[in-house]
Image (cartoon, rainbow, N blue to C red):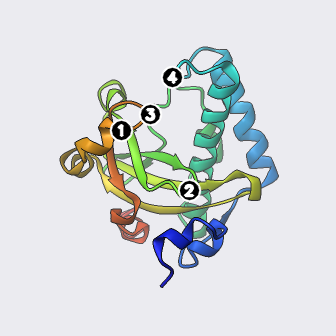
Amino acid sequence: MIPFKSLAILPWRMAFPHKMKIHISNQQQIDSYKYAVKIVEIGKAYKRFNETKEQQIQRWYLGKLGEIVFFNLLAKNDIHVDYSELFKFEADEYDFIMPNQDLKIDVKTCKPFDRYLLVPEEQTNNKAEIDIYVAAIVDEKNSIGFIDGYIWKNNLIKNSDPAVSKNMPEGRCYNSKLCDLKNINKLFAYWYF
């Protein structure tokens, strides 16, 4: 086992060898960037932290790449979702719906070596009723990512650490350690049933 402090000096792909790497195609990157530009230009992007337009575009672009990683993992597991649905210009109410019980999924994108899944408290009040949060790790420079796991919204809120929330530059956030998330394969087992 690699000591945690040593992980910081390894490329993230080597630090997490047990995770399935998911490739992001060039076309998916282009589609995601176009979406991010458009959503910011038409004023449907949430503005945070006094972001510039370029920072907003980058944040939405990374978020969309996280959704693409989840989409690609669904496809690898023979779960079919219409690709064009990912690029509707809605106010990002939810990202995916599990057809069996109409459970709404929101994909949250993390950067390599983030330790927490973060959901701004204002989003849980302003957005459509989300049931499940999925954490996607994205390495945009290498066009890959992986899914770290998922958590039910009620568990996220109930088990969130107020001390972590208080210290986040993003503002007050519900949070969960990425290492505490459930294995994504458990979610796939119930996708259609």
Q: Are marks 3 and 4 in contact (CB under 8 Å)?
A: yes
**Residue at the bottom extreme, as displayed:** 1
Q: Which residue is at a point 75% across and 32% down the rendered structure image? A: 34
State yes or no: discs 3 and 2 in contact (Cβ < 8 Å).
no
Q: CA distance from mark 3 to mark 4?
A: 8 Å
User: Label 3 near label 1: C-beta < 8 Å?
Assistant: no
Q: Amino acid at mark 4?
A: Phe
What is the secondary structure assignment of the residue under circle 2?
strand
Quick one: label 2 or label 1, which is nearer the N terminus?
Answer: 2
Residue 144: where, in percent of width, then height?
A: 69, 60
Label 4, secondary structure: give it.
Answer: loop
- Could you tell which of marks 3 and 4 lies nearer the N-terminus? 4
At 28% from the left and 46% from the top, the residue drawn is: 153
The C terminus - image quarter: bottom left
Q: What type is the residue that disc 2 sits on?
A: Ile
Q: Which residue is mark 2?
A: 137
Given the image, on which type of amino acid does mark 3 rest? Pro
Q: CA distance from mark 3 to mark 2?
A: 19 Å
**Which picture quadrant has residue 6?**
bottom right
State which mark lies toward you, 2 or 1: 1
Give the Cα distance between marks 1 and 3: 7 Å
Judging by the rendered image, the residue that carries numbered circle 3 is 169
Q: Residues within 10 Å of mark 3 (few under 14, many from 20)?
A: few
Q: Is residue 13 above or below residue 102?
A: below
Mark carried by residue 49: 4
Q: How many marks?
A: 4
Q: Which mark is residue 16?
A: none
Disc 1 designates what residue?
Answer: 167
Mark 3 or 2, nearer chain start = 2
Mark 1 element type: loop
Query: Which circle's residue, 4 or 1, is located before the other in the chain?
Result: 4
Label 4–label 1 contact, CB within 8 A: no
